[in-house]
Amino acid sequence: MILNFKKPKLILLILISFCIITKAFPIQDQNIESGKAAAMANASVTLTDIWSIYHNQAGLGHLKNISIGAFHQSGFIKEQNIQGIAFALPTKTGTIGASYSYYGFSQYNEMQAGLAFGRSFSKYFSIGLQLNYLHTQIAGIYGTANSINFEIGILSQPIDNLFIGAHVYNPTHSKMGEEEIPTVFNLGVSYLFSEKVLFAVGTEKDLNQEAIFKAGIDYKLIDFISLQAGISTNPTKYSFGIGFHYERIIAHVGFVNHQTLGYTPSFTLSYGF
């Protein structure tokens, strides 16, 4: 058989399929990025919006309005796309959130459903917790696997305009089938220089991988438009994006540039009631 090297996407899909087959249940990839987070190189552990349900649930404690949102995160091929929805309901005791995300295609897919709670004790400190149900399906003889894990985060504002966030995913080292799900730590700091400029830095550490360092900036160009940019390491990735704000409708699109594989976009749309 002669491979057609004019179809690199097909070859990449074959390689991905081979990796899937050699592991009965591959590890769930938890790098879900909202449009704004993707544009800021995922330096998002201190951000406070509905997408905190994916980045740091402590941020949910700062929400004032009922919010819903949907996102689409493109992979290098369509079989790697991720789609999801989120919902947040502020109450007197804290914010209740729910999320659902889906990755893959008919022959291989992963699903995660989460139930979260975030509470702000003051403007200086908040905490969040999320319980996740995970499901992986592989066509053929490999079947399915299920797992439950949780994640926890904190967010602090020790002085005005300075924010410190920490988050850990899967601290109990839960497994998917026989494979370990990653335990990932995120630590970040951001500073609001003015009403227009937010600068964020952070580090991400998977216990089985090298640390990733990342930095991002969010700049409010005019009332309805904001711009974002960022950079991260291991491997080096550059990112940028734009946000649109109209009353309670917020849309963001972010692009991440991999030096070898090119650009991948992420899009989010949310509404606050």
Image: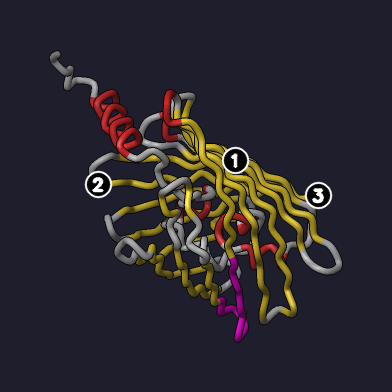
Please provide percent x and percent y for residue 118. Answer: 71, 65
Identify the secondary structure beneath mark 3. Answer: loop
Please provide percent x and percent y for residue 106. Answer: 49, 24
Left or right placement of residue 265 versus residue 18 in this view:
right
**For mark 2, does the 10 Å Cα neighbourhood hold few (<14), some (14 to 19), or many (20 or more) residues?**
few
Return the mark for residue 259: 2
Residue mark closest to the camera, 2 vs 1: 1
Q: Which residue is mark 1?
A: 84
Left or right placement of residue 207 versus residue 225 in this view:
left
**For mark 3, does the 10 Å Cα neighbourhood hold few (<14), some (14 to 19), or many (20 or more) residues?**
few
Residue bounds of the magenta highlight: 152-163
Q: Quadrant of the N terminus?
A: top left
Residue ranking furthest to the bottom: 159
Tell me if residue 24 can be seen.
yes
Mark 3 and mark 1 residues within 8 Å of each other at the beta carbon: no
Residue type indicated by callout 2: Gln
| Magenta region, main secondary structure | strand
Please provide percent x and percent y for residue 131. Answer: 64, 57
Return the mark for residue 34: none
Distance between the Cα atoms at labels 3 and 1? 20 Å
- Marks 3 and 1, the one that precedes in the sequence: 1
Mark 3 and mark 2 residues within 8 Å of each other at the beta carbon: no
- Marks 2 and 1, the one that precedes in the sequence: 1
Residue type indicated by callout 3: Phe
